[in-house]
Amino acid sequence: MDVVWNLGRQRLTQVAYGIAGLAKWLPLRAGSGLTILADAAVADAEAVTRVEECAAFAGRRVERVVLSGPGTLENVTALAERLRGSELVVAVGGGTLLDRAKLAVLLAGDPAVLDRLSVRHRSGLVLLSAASNPGIPLVTVPTTVGTGSELSGAVCLGTAQGKRLVLGNGLQPEVAVLDPVATRTLPVDLLAEGVLEVFFRVAGMFAGDHQELPTEDTFALALLDRLVRLGGELEEARRTGAAPGDRLRLEIAKLSGTSHNPWLNLGRDPCACKGWYLANELSTGLGLRKMTAAAALLPPLWRRITAPDPRWGSARRLERLWQVVRAARPALPADPADGVDALMDAWRIERGITATSGRIDEIARSTTLAWGDGLPTLGALTLADVRQVMTEAARTPQTSVGFR
């Protein structure tokens, strides 16, 4: 039986709705300084200004650091050095910046983390010690949706061997602030991709695991139902040319973070979402956005599950999941693979990718090396399995039509 506990000394992240709440929270924290890490794309946006106003109200002096570029180990290490001595950090930006901030504050408080990150090994998964905890309180203000980095104990890190998934309780921020002001600058196509990213993650964990977990399953299916309905609202806004409102963006942001809550997947196989590993490598190898690769992979992945091929997931659970999706969107095809294709058409998700067979073969090999060949992440899946799915994904036609 699984024991419910937090393996580190770090508490689970608190969630606040609205940046104004910082004005009440900041006086409760010791210190007089505050460092704002701002993504270059939003450095002059209203969200950053409001954080600065809250800091001024609390009597704190502010240093603003504008960041750009990838979240590589070199960049994270440089940021950690810069943050040493900081009293409090507020990170405002997308998933890449939040990941960089989470790892940097942990590294600033525990230099031993660098040894774990620097070790060369073939696995794409890096597990940090449960004893590693950040020495600097971190507040996250996400300006995108989908990754849910503001609430997760995970980061993606760029290395010479490829993008790695780093997990550790110490990566949990102290506070996450969800405010629709922060996502007003987010383009509508990336908002739609954010909806798909949450769908991809929750559906992948649900269908990828063969276990029946009545309470956790109910939570997951309720989240998917709500997500599909919100996707429909976004679709309608795009159809009429209306800008997605604050309420809609906040509701999507809530689900983005909620999808990382431990109770949602307690007892599941942590490696159940096989598609994540393929999407990670395909997007990196072809220079694509993660969701472009994930969207192209979803139909061939689901065809494998319904074949059925239990190595990819449970056909019975995928069918159950799809019944919930169709209840929220009745006009979708009954076949899960055809249906998710139609759903992505409706959400106008870009997924047309091209690659030579030689390039696909290279990426399939790197995927198997990092996540398969005896590693639990891909389990019994072989190089041939990975190559076949990626080959089908690369043949996905580019589409931009809406489903009627």
Image (tube, rainbow, N blue to C red):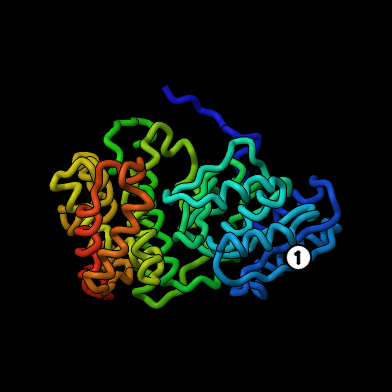
Q: Quadrant of the N terminus?
A: top left
Q: Which residue is mark 1?
A: 52
Crowd band around label 1 with a 10 angstrom C-alpha radius: few (<14), some (14–19), many (20+): many
Q: Residue at x 41, y 72 (%)?
A: 189
Residue 136 on image: x %, y %: 73, 49
In what element is the residue under mark 1?
helix
In the image as oriented, which residue stretches furthest toward the bottom?
A: 241
What's the residue type where badge 1 is placed?
Glu
Regarding residue 221, the answer to whether it shows in the image is no
Residue drawn at the location 57% of the way across and 33% of the way down: 6
Residue 358 seen by the camera: yes
- Residue 45 lies in quadrant: bottom right
Q: Position of residue 111 (x, y in %)?
A: 69, 48
Front-most of residues 358 and 399:
358
Residue at position x 68%, y 71% in the image: 66
Residue at the spot x=38%, y=70% of the render? 288
Return the residue found at the far top: 1
User: Residue 404: horizontal and vertical position, in percent?
Assistant: 22, 68
Instruction: State whether residue 30 is above or below residue 39.
Output: above
